[in-house]
């Protein structure tokens, strides 16, 4: 079996796990009680075509993002309808999202959805679900 050197790849370390939930507050209470989470960062996001409530916390060096669709249609609501609650994506923090998207486009990887959050972060969900069973996300702060 050959070994693969992922040391220089943006995919060498998972930075975030995104989980789609039906009820953000209920899930946060569970995480407080069972996982011992002491601090959440929450925000409501209006994407124009949908509204989301999100909660963030850290498990070690991995950021957990809980995502509740409040209204509208997103890839998250589609996931919830087709699969129910669960792990939606693995996120990777990148320095230059455009450079990485150009590189992945050459490999045939398409973007499902992309956007910007409060002028602080850019994100792009990649069309990897058929190949991997889940979505990869690039995140640039």
Image (tube, grey):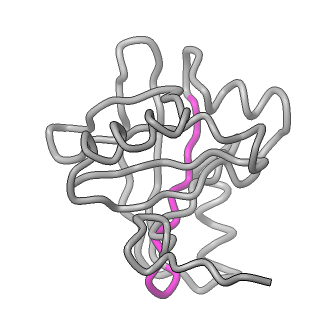
x, y percentage for residue 102? 33, 37
x, y percentage for residue 95? 21, 59
Vertical arrangement, residue 79 with respect to residue 123, above or below: above
Dominant SS type (magenta): strand
| Residue that protrudes farthest toward the front in the picture | 2
Magenta highlight range = 59-69
Quadrant, the N terminus? bottom right
- Camera-side residue of 50 and 106: 106
Q: Is residue 65 magenta?
A: yes
x, y percentage for residue 56? 44, 61
Quadrant, the C terminus? bottom left
Q: Is 52 placed left or right of 69 in the picture?
A: left
Which residue: 45% across, 42% down? 104
Which residue: 61% across, 27% down? 75
| Residue that protrudes farthest toward the right in the picture | 83
Which residue: 66% across, 84% down? 3
């Amino acid at each position: 079996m050959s070994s693969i050197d992922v040391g220089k790849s943006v995919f060498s370390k998972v930075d975030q796990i995104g989980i789609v939930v039906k009820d953000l507050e209920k899930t946060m209470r569970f995480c407080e009680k069972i996982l011992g989470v002491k601090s959440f960062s929450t925000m409501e996001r209006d994407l124009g075509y949908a509204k989301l409530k999100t909660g963030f916390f850290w498990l070690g060096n991995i950021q957990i993002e809980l995502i509740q669709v409040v209204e509208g249609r997103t890839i998250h609501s589609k996931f919830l309808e087709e699969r129910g609650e669960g792990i939606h994506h693995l996120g990777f923090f990148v320095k230059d999202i455009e450079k990485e998207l150009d590189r992945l486009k050459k490999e045939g990887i398409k973007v499902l959805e992309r956007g910007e959050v409060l002028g602080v972060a850019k994100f792009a969900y990649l069309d990897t679900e058929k190949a991997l069973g889940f979505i990869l996300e690039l995140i640039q702060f």
